[in-house]
Image (cartoon, rainbow, N blue to C red):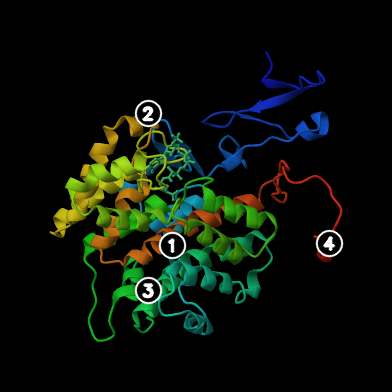
């Protein structure tokens, strides 16, 4: 039996044999490329629920079994043993670096931590209370105007240089989003510090004080960056790829990703979770909110619950839950919201509504509590996510640019509008 699926148009009896293509893991896909040519039809799949948009060798996730691999390495092992810049290298190069490659990579990233001085003035155009995601998207987009030395997107060296710039500059840009809103002076990077420490230094140090973040905070943030670095073809990554497929400027593509991530169904959920937990306030109110989430007439959803792909525990949520517990214990923080979160998780996971729909806590459920424990303001949570995900976005953009199947992304539609009609002069309407 051949590896094909036969599609029969029952109206005409015409048939098309579509090849079934298998990857390393996961469900095989049906190649429907010839569907329009042979049968004169398109497919429709709102929300891309069953559509693979590309071939990729960067990240694999098995939603039924809660598995997440980057270049074949389980997320649990990376979280335990790696660091964010090493994960960036892995995502971009496909292999872990050896010792010398790691030294060279760290150095290369450090050589790009500064931003052009004029870019610092860009922030002044924003209102003092602008959302940092809006600022970040604008500033990253503006980076496109500074790097004319690397605008040839067909040149692999230019692409890698752009990747280094994106990864290295995001902490600097993110820190300024925070400091602008807080009325604090911008701080230049200190390349003697590690990637995460440098971010904390640029973000939270005061000109009048010595600043040394606790190692436990550095490690917690490093962990969050690793866990958010990539997640295959999610909405923001797909936005980056779609923009990239038009051969747009890569910084503009990353800005598209930032704007997509901002939504509360995606990266904005970490912010929404904390607002929700604060609204719940006390474990005695949880059932009321669980009932609201189940009520089909109420738009409320449990934030940080559910995932398009994970129909089991999100492996990142398992790691973050433990990290959150450890951090709160180690820093001796009174964090009543953590109690509320754990109890909410327990109640929801025993509820038939959530069991039947396989709704589990996702990465955003506990991450906000860690950011809160690190005194990162709520409006900055999604910025933190974007800082980490920029590594995945740029790796996926490079993969797209090198894809032999590269062509502009151009979905089709099923037109359900009005039939053709003649224009009527305004006086006669
Ligand atoms: N609370 C209550 N019900 C839910 C929830 C939730 N959080 N999530 C899904 N459902 C229900 C939904 O109403 C639907 O029920 P029914 O079958 O009766 O109509 C069913 O579960 C399937 O949901 P869906 O909307 O078809 O699932 P989706 O794959 O389109 O949406 C999601 C996935 C993540 C957008 C959604 O689960 C959600 O809105 N969750 C809350 C927001 C959130 O936590 N987002 C972060 C996602 S993970 C990190 C990231 O992507 O950045």
- Label disc, if present, on residue 178 of the rendered structure: 3
Foreground residue among 106 and 45: 45
Mark 3 and mark 2: Cα distance apart in space: 41 Å
Mark 3 and mark 1: Cα distance apart in space: 13 Å
Q: Quadrant of the C terminus?
A: bottom right
Callout 3 touching callout 2 (CB < 8 Å): no
Q: Where is residue 310 shown, x and y percent of the image?
A: 42, 37
Identify the residue position indicated by label 1 in the image.
Answer: 387
Foreground residue among 421 and 166: 421
Q: Quadrant of residue 267?
A: bottom left
Label 1 lies in ligand 1 vicinity (Cβ under 8 Å): no
Q: Does residue 130 appear to the left or right of 8 in the view shown?
A: left
Q: Where is residue 115 shown, x and y percent of the image?
A: 49, 77
- Residue at 61% x, 53% y: name it: 241
State which mark lies toward you, 3 or 1: 3
State which mark lies toward you, 4 or 3: 4
Q: Earlier in the sequence, mark 4 or mark 1?
A: 1
- SS for dot 3: helix
Q: Earlier in the sequence, mark 1 or mark 2?
A: 2
- Label disc, if present, on residue 356 of the rendered structure: 2
Identify the residue position indicated by label 4 in the image.
Answer: 428
- Label disc, if present, on residue 338 of the rendered structure: none
């Amino acid at each position: 039996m051949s590896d094909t699926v036969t599609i029969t148009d029952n109206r005409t009896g015409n048939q098309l044999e579509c090849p079934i293509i298998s990857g390393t893991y996961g469900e095989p896909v049906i190649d429907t490329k010839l569907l329009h040519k042979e049968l004169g039809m398109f497919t429709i799949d709102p929300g891309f629920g069953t559509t693979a948009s590309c071939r990729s060798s960067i990240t694999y996730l098995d939603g039924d079994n809660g598995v997440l691999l980057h270049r074949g390495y389980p997320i649990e092992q990376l979280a335990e043993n790696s660091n964010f810049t090493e994960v960036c290298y892995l995502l971009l190069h496909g292999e872990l670096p050896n010792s010398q490659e790691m030294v060279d990579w760290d150095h290369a990233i450090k050589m790009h931590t500064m931003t052009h001085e004029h870019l610092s003035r860009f922030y002044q155009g924003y209102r003092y209370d602008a959302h940092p995601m809006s600022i970040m998207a604008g500033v990253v987009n503006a980076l496109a105007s500074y790097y004319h030395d690397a605008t040839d997107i067909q040149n692999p060296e230019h692409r890698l240089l752009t990747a280094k710039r994106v990864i290295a500059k995001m902490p600097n840009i993110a820190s300024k989003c925070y400091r602008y809103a807080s009325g604090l002076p911008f701080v230049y990077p200190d390349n003697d510090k590690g990637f995460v420490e440098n971010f904390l230094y640029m973000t939270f140090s005061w000109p009048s004080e010595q600043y040394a973040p606790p190692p436990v905070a550095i490690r917690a943030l490093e962990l969050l960056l690793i866990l958010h670095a990539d997640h295959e073809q999610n909405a923001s990554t797909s936005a980056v790829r779609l923009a990239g497929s038009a051969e747009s400027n890569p910084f503009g593509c990353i800005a598209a990703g930032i704007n997509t991530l901002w939504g509360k169904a995606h990266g904005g959920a970490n912010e929404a979770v904390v607002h929700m937990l604060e609204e719940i306030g006390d474990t005695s109110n949880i059932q009321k909110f669980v009932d609201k989430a189940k009520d089909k007439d109420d738009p409320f959803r449990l934030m940080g619950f559910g995932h398009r792909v994970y129909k089991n525990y999100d492996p990142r949520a398992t790691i973050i839950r433990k990290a959150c517990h450890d951090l709160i214990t180690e820093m001796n923080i009174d964090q009543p919201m953590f109690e509320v979160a754990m109890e909410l998780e327990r109640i929801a996971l025993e509820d038939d509504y959530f069991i039947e729909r396989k709704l589990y806590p996702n990465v955003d459920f506990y991450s906000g509590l860690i950011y809160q424990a690190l005194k990162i303001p709520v409006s900055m949570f999604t910025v933190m996510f974007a800082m980490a995900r920029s590594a995945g976005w740029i790796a996926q953009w490079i993969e797209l640019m090198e894809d032999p199947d590269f062509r502009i992304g151009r979905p089709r539609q099923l037109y359900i509008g009005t039939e053709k009609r003649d224009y009527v002069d305004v006086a006669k309407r």
